[in-house]
Image (cartoon, rainbow, N blue to C red):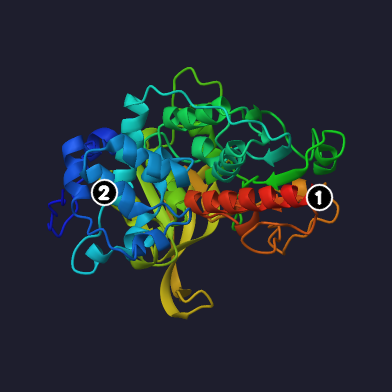
């Protein structure tokens, strides 16, 4: 039976918590589609034979096929199509930048709004989690062992793909909880941790072993894993958790955080709870320096922690903010103040060594730089002081040097990222593969997952050819 298309030029709106309510709690902001909303939105898909949306998906989901199942109200069938390509559909439906990937190539977006692919992915994954009673089948072992360093999105994806092929997979995670950036970086109000844990539990049911509190390079080295531990290949997916600072005066004052530390204390250590063993400052006025998704997360967390005023301080304009449009809109709705065309030059401290202000200078945009964005230039005689008691630096991260410093022959670039030979993730060491932020520097969850899929395929071919 032919599907009756929905030619509404706009997406079905996503129900959300009221902004002035949600900025005081850590409950999920987006409430999700109802089945009726999902079916209606799915019927907006034209089912294009050439599938331009699929070409924009780093893990190659057959998007028209899963959406067609939603339109037919076969939600479990839609999940089976999704899960064939994506190890973490409930996660991707929430945090992927669909607007620049699959939805950015949607034909419906030419004369209106693209199909809400991410919203439908989230709906299908949530429906499966709430309704499915089938247990995960453990694959038949093939007798080969692979080690994965890092239990973030790239490592989890590679582990899932290899486990399905029968490999004995062990993930070594430095923190006390698996999930990587999904648990320490992305706030509960964007990605509930119970959803991440459910995905991880599924991998364990497939036979994946996860060893936490294992800092590779300290507890064990890659050479030891491939030597006495008998792993035939290693996939390095250790992320990029080393924060960058500006190098301006005053950055060592009390009340200056990296966004990584601030978010980890809140998300992983639950600093917002009264009985938290890892408390955090309850600030009144907070400045977050940076304009990406991490900066939005930190600012929105600061608001929920009770700050009266929270600023995003960014040296370019609103049009140049690299964060997702949806995250910027949510931040604005929640009362975050955007101080664009502004750059910090000094952190000011009081007699007790606490932050008491931030000296800034106004900027203007000049000619484009190497990245194609207009270069920010200081305005003469435009210095001013922003009254804040906390400063959160969110200007990027780089890979921790521990693995490269303890693995002889592992080639890295000047940014500390591991060098690979392309899509398959092979490094300068035989049998050692790498992907995700450890290779690219800080990027998106879905790109890290794509790297995990490519590496798993390459590792499988490598081990088979060694027989």
Residue 203 drawn above or below residue 240: above
The mark that comes first in sequence, 2 or 1, is 2
Crowd around label 2: few <14 · some 14–19 · many ≥20 (10 Å): many
Q: How far, Cα to Cα, is label 2 from label 1?
A: 50 Å
Percent x, y for residue 191?
A: 40, 37
Q: Is residue 350 visible in this depiction of the protein? A: no
The secondary element bearing badge 2 is classed as: helix
Residue 215 appears left or right of 240? right
Residue labelled with disc 2: 68
Q: Which mark is residue 443?
A: none
Percent x, y for residue 104?
A: 33, 63
Q: Residue furthest top?
A: 275
Residue 413 drawn above or below residue 309: below
Q: Quadrant of residue 170?
A: top right
The secondary element bearing badge 1 is classed as: helix
Badge nearest the viewer, 2 or 1? 2
Crowd around label 1: few <14 · some 14–19 · many ≥20 (10 Å): few
Residue 240 appears left or right of 375? right
Residue that appears at 12% across and 52% down? 4
Q: Which mark is residue 405?
A: 1
Residue 138 drawn above or below residue 303: above
Percent x, y for residue 35?
A: 20, 36
Q: Nearer the viewer, residue 414 or 145?
A: 145
Residue that appears at 72% across and 63% down? 413
Residue that appears at 60% across and 52% down? 437
């Amino acid at each position: 039976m032919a599907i009756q298309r929905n030619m509404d030029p706009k997406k079905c709106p996503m129900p959300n918590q009221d902004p002035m309510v949600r900025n005081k709690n850590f409950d999920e902001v987006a409430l999700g589609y109802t089945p009726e909303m999902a079916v209606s939105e799915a019927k907006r898909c034209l089912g294009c034979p050439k599938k331009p949306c699929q070409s924009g998906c780093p893990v190659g989901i057959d998007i028209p096929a899963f959406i067609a199942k939603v339109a037919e109200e076969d939600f479990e069938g839609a999940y089976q199509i999704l899960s064939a390509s994506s190890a973490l559909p409930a996660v991707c439906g929430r945090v992927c930048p669909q607007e620049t990937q699959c939805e950015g190539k949607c034909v419906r977006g030419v004369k209106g709004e693209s199909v809400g692919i991410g919203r439908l992915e989230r709906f299908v994954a949530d429906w499966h989690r709430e309704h499915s009673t089938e247990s995960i089948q453990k694959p038949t072992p093939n007798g080969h062992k692979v080690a994965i360093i890092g239990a973030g999105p790239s490592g989890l994806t590679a582990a899932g793909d290899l486990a399905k092929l029968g490999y004995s997979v062990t993930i070594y995670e430095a923190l006390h909880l698996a999930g990587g950036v999904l648990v320490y970086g992305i706030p509960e109000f964007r990605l509930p941790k119970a959803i991440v844990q459910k995905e991880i539990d599924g991998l364990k049911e497939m036979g994946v072993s996860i060893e936490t509190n294992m800092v590779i390079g300290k507890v064990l080295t890659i050479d030891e894993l491939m030597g006495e531990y008998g792993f035939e290949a290693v996939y390095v997916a250790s992320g990029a958790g080393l924060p960058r600072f500006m190098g301006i005066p005053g950055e060592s004052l009390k009340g200056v955080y990296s966004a990584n530390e601030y978010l980890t204390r809140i998300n992983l250590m639950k600093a917002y709870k009264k009985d938290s063993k890892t408390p955090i400052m309850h600030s009144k006025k907070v400045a977050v320096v940076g304009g990406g998704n991490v900066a939005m997360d930190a600012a929105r967390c600061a608001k929920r922690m009770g700050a009266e005023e929270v600023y995003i301080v960014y040296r370019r304009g609103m049009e140049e903010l690299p964060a997702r449009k949806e995250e910027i809109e949510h931040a604005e709705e929640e009362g975050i103040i955007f101080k664009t065309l502004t750059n910090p030059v000094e952190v000011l401290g009081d007699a007790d060594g606490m932050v008491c202000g931030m000296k800034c200078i106004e900027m203007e945009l000049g000619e484009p730089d190497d990245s194609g964005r207009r270069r920010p230039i200081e305005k003469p005689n435009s210095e001013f002081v922003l009254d804040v008691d906390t400063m959160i630096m969110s200007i990027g991260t780089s890979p921790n040097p521990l693995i490269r410093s303890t693995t002889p022959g592992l080639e890295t670039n000047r940014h500390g990222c591991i060098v690979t030979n392309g899509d398959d993730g092979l490094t300068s060491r035989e049998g050692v593969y790498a992907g995700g932020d450890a290779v690219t520097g800080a990027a998106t969850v879905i790109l890290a997952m794509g790297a995990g899929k490519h590496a798993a395929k390459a590792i499988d071919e490598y081990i088979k050819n060694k027989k």
